Image: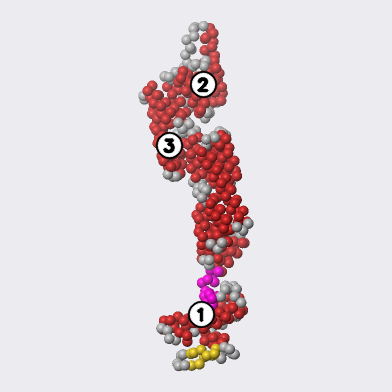
Amino acid sequence: LINVPILDRGASPENTGNTDFTRAFFTTACGYKEQGNAFYIKKDYSEAFNYYTKAIDVCPKNASYYGNRAATLMMLSRYREALEDSQQAVRLDDTFMKGHLREGKCHLLLGNAMAASRCFQKVLELEPDNSQAQQELKNAESILEYERMAEIGFEKRDFRMVVFCMDRALESASACHRFKVLKAECLALLGRYPEAQSVASDILRMDSTNGDALYVRGLCLYYEDCIDKAVQFFIQALRMAPDHEKARLACRNAKALKAKKEEGNKAFKEGNFEEAYELYSEALTIDPNNIKTNAKLYCNRATVGSKLKKLEQAIEDCTKAIKLDESYIKAYLRRAQCYMDTEQYEEAVRDYEKVYQTEKTKEHKHLLKTAQLELKKSKRKDYYKVLGVDKNATEDEIKKAYRKRALMHHPDRHSGASAEVQKEEEKKFKEVGEAFTVLSDPKKKSRYDSGHDLEDDDMNMDFDANNIFKAFFSGPGGFSFEASGPGNFFFQFG
């Protein structure tokens, strides 16, 4: 809060001679000053300003008139004008203590702590026990320390520290646009775009030509992936401040990022996936700080990667995109599909659940159910893998696969092996028979493919692997078994 400045009531006529004209001249100026004082007490600062201005027009070399108008301008939050009047007051009278105090206060509010310190030290030379000057001098020293800490924090990219320091500094320097802009820039770099936009907009309402505030507005739009609008603000900032290096660099990055991303999109649409992959990779190197755009670039590269069958890389890119933007639904969907394609069903279910919790659409519900079904199916025996055939295998391919695997794992072929090997091969022989029993029966195969547990379907799943084998190989051209000793068989062509 700003302390209400105390007005200067006394004023002495200039030593211009004791004439009626001088008395009338001075009386008029005093009258304007008194009227200004009356309006000031009523808190009608606009009228007070008008009368103090009239007093100054009549008597332009009276320090107290400038001092009073400075006090009024401070109450109107017109600190730069108040600073000018305070400086003029002390130029006219270097011993004018209140003038130095107001000058210091204006410097402090505007963020110039060094200049403020000099003013308060001057006050203490004139009045060593002035408690207000003593306190304001401490405030100025605190601001200098916060500025020092903020500079170190920015260099270390500790943007939270910078925001903290600027908030503390602004408690005494509430009109300092420089501190506000630095705070806004750091808020933008922290991804707190609405707060940064609000601070920058407040500055622009007071000063539409502020290049720093225009730069911050552009930075927020740039980081929110509104690149075209961002470029407009950067260009406007450069018009206001042609040497604004941050705006120049951001503008260059924004244009380069947009161009490279569009090149990648074009290559992808034309089916040039290798080229698109390289272009998205190049785009990702332009500005590591642009989180939202980079998240989209990672997701785009993941899409291309899945087309190129680089599924593990695609999963990694989706994970990077999600790390940058946890709300990025498209990245979750892309990663989930890659998990499905690599048969990592638990991970796919987890991602689809995240998506469905966020957006409860019919499509997302269907994707989740499909993943849950595949997860359920994956926990059963995979009869296709047991036989070594594709899920779209024909009846003839299933029969050929059974013939090959059954002969490979039949216990008779491994009768001379160790007990452990015999046991393992017998297990595999039974699994091959079980797989063939299901996949060779259209009804069982259909229910198996749809994810049903066959044991729960009142279907007879009891079978004897040897009987299946005998039945399959019986008949002309098949195989038969003859005993060659207890528990042993040998193959014989019919």
Say which label, 1 or 2, has the lower sequence index.
Answer: 2
State the image quarter where residue 278 is shown: bottom right
Q: Secondary structure at mark 2?
A: helix
Q: Is residue 62 visible?
A: yes
Q: Is residue 21 above or below residue 171?
A: above
Q: Is residue 486 above or below residue 65?
A: below
Residue bearing the label numbered 1:
431
Instruction: Name the spot of residue 483 as percent of width and height, x first.
Output: 48, 93
Instruction: Calculate the distance from the C-alpha at mark 3 to the C-alpha at mark 2.
Output: 38 Å
In the image, the segment drawn in magenta is: 374-388
385 magenta-colored: yes
Label 1 amino acid? Answer: Glu
Residue bearing the label numbered 2:
37
Instruction: Name the spot of residue 328 as percent of width and height, x first.
Output: 55, 54
Residue at horizontal 51 percent and vertical 46 percent from the top: 192
Left or right of 356 on screen, residue 164: left
Closer to us: mark 3 or mark 1? 1
Q: Between residues 260 and 460, which one lies in front from this camera angle?
A: 260
State the image quarter where residue 459 is shown: bottom right
Disc 1 crowd, CA 10 A, few/some/many (<14, 14-19, 20+): many
